[in-house]
Amino acid sequence: MSKKLHLTLACGDYEIVRALMDGSVKPDGIELTVLTNMNSDIRHWRMIRNREFDVCELSMSNYLLAKDTGQPLTAIPVFLHRRFRHGFIFLNATKGIEKPPDLIGRKVGLRTFQVTSNLWIRGILEHDYQVPHKKMNWFTQDEEDVEFTPSKDLVLQRIQPGKNVVKMLLDGNLDALIHPELIQPILDRDKGVRRLFENYKELELDYFRRTGIFPIMHTTAIKQEIVDQYPWVATNLMQAFDRAKEIAYERMENPRRVPLAWFSHALEEQEEILGKDPWVYGLGGANRKNLETLIQYSYEQGLIRSRIPTEELFVKSTQG
């Protein structure tokens, strides 16, 4: 029996990778150890700072910074996480913020400045709602994954160790908070906190219809030395990810698998709006526009020093 290349893959526990996790799909010539028992913050940190995995689902914003600073990583255009972001701007309900321009001059909290969700939201606020990111006062909670030097005219400071941006929002020490996940006060229906966009789904539908963008959050990064030594790895992984996603879609055709009363209706609605394959991989037109928009935002917000051509981000053999 020929020996397979053993690689570690760190990613989220998603339906679209379940076939890779349970071994029903195996990349040709590769033996995968799939690691899912960590949240995305830990996974990204461990890959960017310590290069602990051979293949890793990685924050797209972090990946742009890694490429900009010359880290030995490349990627395949497999985007395991996407999410619309209009519903993740939270407000202290007593601060009198009613519309996006009211954020100008306000104190806005973040977990980190770099995280992809925040990059998207700042770009959308700036381009769609005329709220420049340099006209707000930013307060971050955690250390950035990739070291960078903020623009001189960007008001950005780290809060004191031990403080929490969600609590600061509740206490009124912050006017607003942009967060990658739903915060607990929203889940608890705390009247002291609300969304900037209560009709976020309508706005997200309009955003997609206008732009064709279903925002990419994460890409799939590979250590450069693996691709250099085994050029076939990228293509074989792409094929395996594609097949795993096809199996996920086939499973989702059975509504009994998901304990939601109107799941079939939600799936039909999604297909009508986003098409049959919302998680499409590769560098087709929709994904290219998606990526070029994020690159533009990253450059405008001072995270990367130049606009990296999309082709330079991904292994060339996978571009078809």
Image: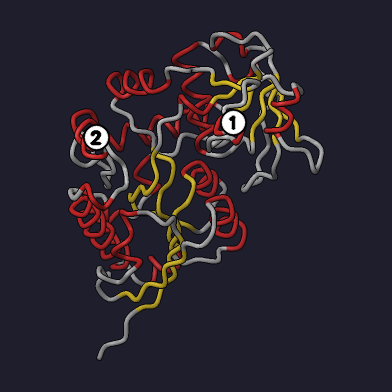
Question: What crowding class fits label 2: few (fewer than 14 Cα within 10 Å), some (14-19), or many (20 or more)?
Answer: few
Question: Residue 122 placed where, x, y %?
Answer: 53, 24
Question: Residue 161 placed where, x, y %?
Answer: 80, 42
Q: Amino acid at mark 2?
A: Gly
Mark earlier in primary sequence (2, 1): 2
Residue visible at 50% across and 35% down? Answer: 117
Question: Residue 113, relative to residue 92: is it above or below?
Answer: below
Taking the view exactly as shown, the residue that stands out farthest to the bottom is 1
Q: In this view of the protein, can residue 223 be seen by the observer?
A: no
Residue bearing mark 2: 285
Question: What crowding class fits label 1: few (fewer than 14 Cα within 10 Å), some (14-19), or many (20 or more)?
Answer: some
Question: Residue 124, relative to residue 215: is it above or below?
Answer: above
* Residue 224, image quadrant: bottom left
Q: Nearer the viewer, mark 2 or mark 1?
A: 2
Between residue 262 and residue 229, name the one nearer to us.
Answer: 262
Between residue 247 and residue 193, name the one nearer to us.
Answer: 193
Q: Amino acid at mark 1?
A: Gly
Local secondary structure at mark 2: helix
CA–CA distance in space, label 2 to label 1: 26 Å
Question: Residue 253 placed where, x, y %?
Answer: 18, 48
Q: Which quadrant of the rendered structure holds the N terminus?
A: bottom left
Question: Residue 197, relative to residue 111: is it above or below?
Answer: above
Residue visible at 19% across and 50% down? Answer: 254
Q: Which mark is residue 202?
A: none
* Residue 157, image quadrant: top right
Residue visible at 40% across and 31% down? Answer: 84
Question: Residue 184 placed where, x, y %?
Answer: 60, 36
Residue bearing mark 1: 302
